[in-house]
Image (tube, rainbow, N blue to C red):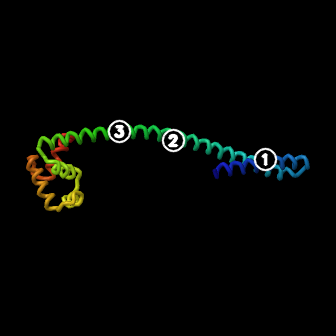
Amino acid sequence: MRDKFIAIVLLVIMCLNFFDVLTDISLGVPEWHIFSESLIVLVSGVGALFLIKDINSRTSNISSLKEELLISDDKFRNISDEMKSARHEYSEVIHNQFEQWSLTSSEQAIAMLLLKGLSFKEIGGVRNTKEKTIRQQASVIYSKANVEGRHEFAAWFLEDFM
C-alpha cells in the first residue's frame, strides 16, 4: 500500500513538473531551469516505473506462493490421512499382539501408555494408581510378552520397522 502511494506521488510530481516545463518553455525561461525540471520529470517517471514494476513482480510472486501453499496444504492433508490410516492399522496390530499375549484390558491400557513413553509415575497419575502398582503390572506385562523390560518391550514393536 505504501509503495502504491509513493508511485502515485512520483507520477503526480512527474505530471506537475511536465506541465511546468511546458509553461516555462512558452515563457522563455533559461535553458538550465528547463533542463533541471525536465530531469525531475524524467527521474520521477523512471522511479515510478521501477516501483510499479517491483509492485507487479511482488504481486506475481505472492500469487505464485499462494498457489504453492495450497498445493502443499493438499499434499499435507493427504499425508496426514495416510498417517492416520497407518496409525490406526498399527494400533490394531499392537492390540492383536496384546490379545495373543493374553493381556487384560487394564494391562493393555498400561502397555499402550508404556509404548507411548510415559513413566511409571505418569501412568500412575493418568490411571489414579500408585507407581508401585504400575511397576508390578508392567512386570506382569513383560513376563507375558517374554521380554526383559521396558526397552525390549518397546523394541519388540519397533523391530520390524528398522
Tag 1 and tag 3, C-beta contact below 8 Å: no
Residue 57 in percent (x, y) is at: 59, 42
Residue 103 in percent (x, y) is at: 13, 46
Label 3 or label 2, whichever comes before in sequence order? 2
Residue 66 has which mark?
Answer: 2
- The amino acid beneath tag 3 is Asp
Question: Residue 52 is drawn in which quadrant?
Answer: top right
**Residue that label 1 marks:** 15
Residue 81 has which mark?
Answer: 3
The residues tagged by marks 1 and 2 sit, at their Cα atoms, a distance apart of 36 Å
Secondary structure found at label 1 = helix
Q: Which residue corresponds to the image point at 13% horizontal and 55% vertical from the top-left?
A: 137
Discs 1/2, front? 2
- The amino acid beneath tag 2 is Lys
Q: Residues within 10 Å of mark 1 (few under 14, many from 20)?
A: some
Quadrant location, the C terminus = top left
Q: Nearer the viewer, residue 31 or 73?
A: 73
Q: Nearer the viewer, residue 131 or 159?
A: 131
Left or right: where 60 falls relative to 117: right
